[in-house]
Image (cartoon, rainbow, N blue to C red):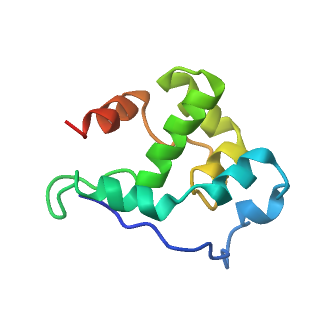
Amino acid sequence: MLIPSSSGHQTNLFGTDLLLQLDPTDPLLQLAKAIPWQELERAFAKHYCQNLGRSARPIRLMCGLLILKQLENLSDEKVVLKCKRNPYYQSFCGLTEFGSKQPCDGSELTQFRNRRH
């Protein structure tokens, strides 16, 4: 089941907004602005069932991790671990609050890549 992502950034009333704490001129944040995330979500949405199984990870998160994996030449497990540790990675992947847990398991990236078949 696909969870729709928000179309814009909304500040958090109770927590600390991740994007407000980061340098907006950072190359990763600039790249994130240039990527047509909504087009990617529309393209991948056809590979998800609406009411079947547990909720899937957001498409932006999964695509973001795969982009970072290629940019940094990392394994699936390493990119997920680096995302846990790096607020710029988290923001690039569409997360709005810093999370201290891994956003997904490395094996989920393999499953996401295989959805196109």
Give the quadrant of the N terminus: bottom left
Where residue 97 sits in the image (x, y, percent)? Answer: 64, 59
The picture quadrant where one finds residue 20 is bottom right
Residue 89 in the figure: left or right of residue 53: right
Residue sitting at x 38%, y 50%? 57
Residue sitting at x 60%, y 21%? 73
Residues 34 and 17: in front is 34
Residue 107 in the figure: left or right of residue 23: left
Residue sitting at x 66%, y 60%? 33
- Most extreme residue toward the bottom is 13
Q: How many numbered dots are placed on residues in this image?
A: 0
- Most extreme residue toward the left is 52
Residues 52 and 115: in front is 115
Where residue 37 sits in the image (x, y, percent)? Answer: 50, 59
Residue 9 in the figure: left or right of residue 87: left
Measured along the vertical axis of the image, is residue 97 above or below residue 12?
A: above
Where residue 101 sits in the image (x, y, percent)? Answer: 56, 41
Residues 70 and 89: in front is 70
State whether residue 81 appears in this view: no
Residue sitting at x 42%, y 33%? 105
Where residue 8 sits in the image (x, y, percent)? Answer: 57, 74
Give the quadrant of the C terminus: top left
Measured along the vertical axis of the image, is residue 19 above or below residue 115?
A: below
The picture quadrant where one finds residue 23 is bottom right
Measured along the vertical axis of the image, is residue 102 above or below residue 37?
A: above
State whether residue 70 appears in this view: yes
